[in-house]
Amino acid sequence: MGAKAGISVDEYLHTSFPDLDREYRDGELVERSVPDYLHGRTQALLLVFFEALRKKLSFYACSETRVKVREGLYLIPDVSVFRPSPPPSSVPDQPPFIAVEILSPDDRLNAVRDKLEEYKSWGVQHVWLVDPHSRRMYTCEAGLTEVPSLRIPDLGVEVTPDEIFE
């Protein structure tokens, strides 16, 4: 879902879109799928989960925040978690500790997979995909792997389906 734009990075960063924010890929605005209720609810529950760990684990969670992956590439993860401190700028250019994408009914899996791989290549330590419609969770290491829960063992963090799916 790309819309040829031919706008500069500066223009993009100073544009407010009337509906859903866009991503930016080398001069092109990239539309995002419109989230439905399950997407929004899952996103809210993930944010609540990470916010509960803020003081204990220095987690700084945010939703739909533009991040600069590289020059000319700005993506918008559904949920980003920074650690051990919040990002120093309003458009972070350092990878978050965790990046989560939540599937919407209109998402194309190929495009989502590519985006997850870009996060991983950028240096995001934990890249997760959540499908609220099928109640499935995936990690992105060398491709997607379905998992029963999303875990960060060295921190004792585990996100179970009951915590983020209704």
Image (cartoon, grey):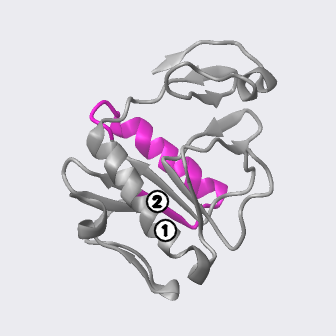
Q: Could you say whether the residue bearing mark 2 is in a helix, strand or loop?
A: helix
Residue at 66 percent across and 37 percent down: it is 74
Query: Per the image, is 113 magenta?
Result: yes
Q: Could you say whether the residue bearing mark 1 is in a helix, strand or loop?
A: helix
Picture quarter with the C terminus: bottom left
Q: Is residue 76 visible?
A: yes
Q: Which mark is residue 50?
A: 1
Q: Residues within 10 Å of mark 1 (few under 14, many from 20)?
A: many
Whether label 1 touches label 2, CB < 8 Å: yes
Q: Would you name the residue on which mark 2 appears?
A: 47
Q: Which residues are magenta?
A: 104-128
| Closer-to-camera residue (60/96) | 60
Query: Per the image, is 32 magenta?
Result: no
Residue at 51 percent across and 67 percent down: it is 51
Residue 44 location (% of width, % of height): 40, 53
> Does residue 25 sit above or below 71 in this rendering?
above
Residue 30 occupies which quadrant of the picture? top right
> Does residue 28 sit above or below 91 in this rendering?
above
Residue 145 location (% of width, % of height): 33, 63
Q: Which amino acid lies under the numbered mark 2 shown in the image of this protein?
A: Leu
